[in-house]
Amino acid sequence: MAATTHTVTNQPPPLVGYDVFAADHALTEAVERHVPLELLDEVRGELSKLGTSAGSAQAQEWGFLANENPPKLRTHDRYGHRIDHVDFHPAWHRLLGHAVTNGLTDAWGRPGGHVRRAAGFLVWTQTEAGHGCPLSMTHAAVPALRVDPELAAVWEPKLTSRVYEGEELRPAAEKTGVLFGMGMTEKQGGSDVRANTTTAAPLAADGEYVLTGHKWFCSAPMSDAFLVLAHAPGGLTCFLVPRVLEDGTRNVFRIQRLKDKLGNRSNASSEVEFDGTWARRVGEEGRGVRTIIEMVAATRLDCVIGSAALMRQAVAQAVHHAAYRSAFGGVLVDKPLMRNVLADLALESEAATTLGLRLAAAYDADTEQERAFLRLAVPAAKYWVTKRCTPTTAEALECLGGNGYVEESGMPRLLREAPLNSIWEGSGNVQALDVLRALQREPQALNAFLEEVGTARGADHRLDAAIKDLLAELADLEGIEARARRLVERMALVLQGSLLVRWAPPAVADAFCASRLGGDWGTAFGTLPHSLDLATVVHRARAVV
């Protein structure tokens, strides 16, 4: 019998045993909006099944175990042979396997594929974000390989397969499903890939080369193949590097060490060396950046979706805690000041989800207009949504008080993960400069962006004023590079406001426009105007078990 001093009271039950998809109103409504009507029942069913798995005690345990048992590098076997092997905990394989079998690397060839995959990615990676990296890279490799139809015919069916074959390295011809990684950045250049020093020497056979050099960040090094950049005689070029050659021998792929990272600890990020490494050219020599550009855009969109997933899980945990925790004579969620904080967080989460799914829908539409829209909207969204992830997650953690500061709550893991997507695939300045390049070189992209935000004109006076201010910013090129972050922030906020005014409930749209566009907001969360319908915003964000 427990001592009376050990009686537990006033603690919320765990947020477990629920459908992560169905409990997210912003996400379910986005799916209904963007998926063709004839597919809607099918898509709802598959996402609800995935959401139920994501909310289960088993999947949550997999997430904890994968992070508590990070991957380990074994460079040599007991006899001294070089093996360059990374051991992952079984929980990692269960998470990754479940994701692959549920189509999270399969978007490019099925109707509504990008929306249904983005929604699934947002749902499933709430269990654990690290395994989203190989999912994203495998998904994003498809458009790069399509530059070479011969390569795409061989690899694309394996990349989009729903068969997960674990970590066993075999020739790709013997496998039904494969995973891809990427090796772009080097220690002397970072995002400046044109400063790469890895070289590619042609072999006698057409399209075959040997690589010499290093890569500073190469995630998921146990993948079956990698897309890398190296300097060929004709300039910076994209190459496909398999881990295992056709004859079954290991390609030269020396893993020097695994990174000891702030977060993302379940995923192995490595430094690798190439020394006579066999590679197959993808695209033309000297057009490496052009070859990978669509791949980069796809992974940037996943940064948006991944950040939206982290924010959603953090906000769901905060609202859930406040709905059960009592203090100062009442339930926290009913306290005006806590309600203000929760509503503010909920706005950030919903705006991120709504924007991410709109971008995925543009991929599915695949029209000239939508492609032009994506050219500006993706880097702007990547800049802003990933920037908002860390403060949102930190404030949500604080809503749990000391309970949120301990590892068992899962909130510290979310907080450590939060900065990653802002860094991966180009940090904030890189995104801002990319927006400037598009504005200067591709006028059709700005036209498409302005047409998108303009569809909501007249619906909210604060949005109208923000659009007018944005146009004034765009017309003034004085000191444009130094103002790039300010400009891109305004673009992202205006776009989010436009989407919420058109599609979100009035309480959400009103609160967003009043604070983010109208300026009636402080510098910390919980500073929304008190006259808004904050109870409705909070209730909408609650994940009911």
Image (tube, helix red, strand yellow):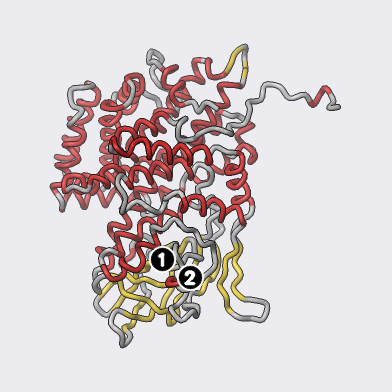
Type of amino acid under label 2 = Val
| Left or right: 110, with 261 as reference point | left
Residue located beneath label 2 in the image: 272
Residue 478: x and y, percent?
17, 44
| Left or right: 238, with 315 as reference point | left
Label 2–label 1 contact, CB within 8 A: yes
Q: Nearer the viewer, residue 64 or 33?
A: 33
Residue located beneath label 1 in the image: 183
Q: Nearer the viewer, residue 298 or 444?
A: 298
Residue displayed at 27% across by 26% down: 501
Q: Nearer the viewer, residue 75 or 21?
A: 21
Q: Earlier in the sequence, mark 2 or mark 1?
A: 1
Residue 50: x and y, percent?
48, 41
Tell me if residue 483 can be seen. Answer: no
Residue displayed at 48% across by 25% down: 342
Q: Nearer the viewer, residue 464 or 93?
A: 93
Type of amino acid under label 1 = Gly
Residue 525, quarter of picture: top left
Question: Label 2 neighbourhood size at 10 Å, few (<14), some (14-19), many (20+)?
Answer: many
Residue 33 vertical position relative to residue 521 in the rendered view, above or below: below
Residue 52: x and y, percent?
52, 37
Under circle 2, the secondary element is strand
Number of numbered discs overlaid on the protein picture: 2
Residue displayed at 34% across by 45% down: 383
Question: Label 1 neighbourhood size at 10 Å, few (<14), some (14-19), many (20+)?
Answer: many
Under circle 1, the secondary element is strand
Residue 370 vertical position relative to residue 14 in the rendered view, above or below: below
Residue 378 vertical position relative to residue 341 in the rendered view, above or below: below
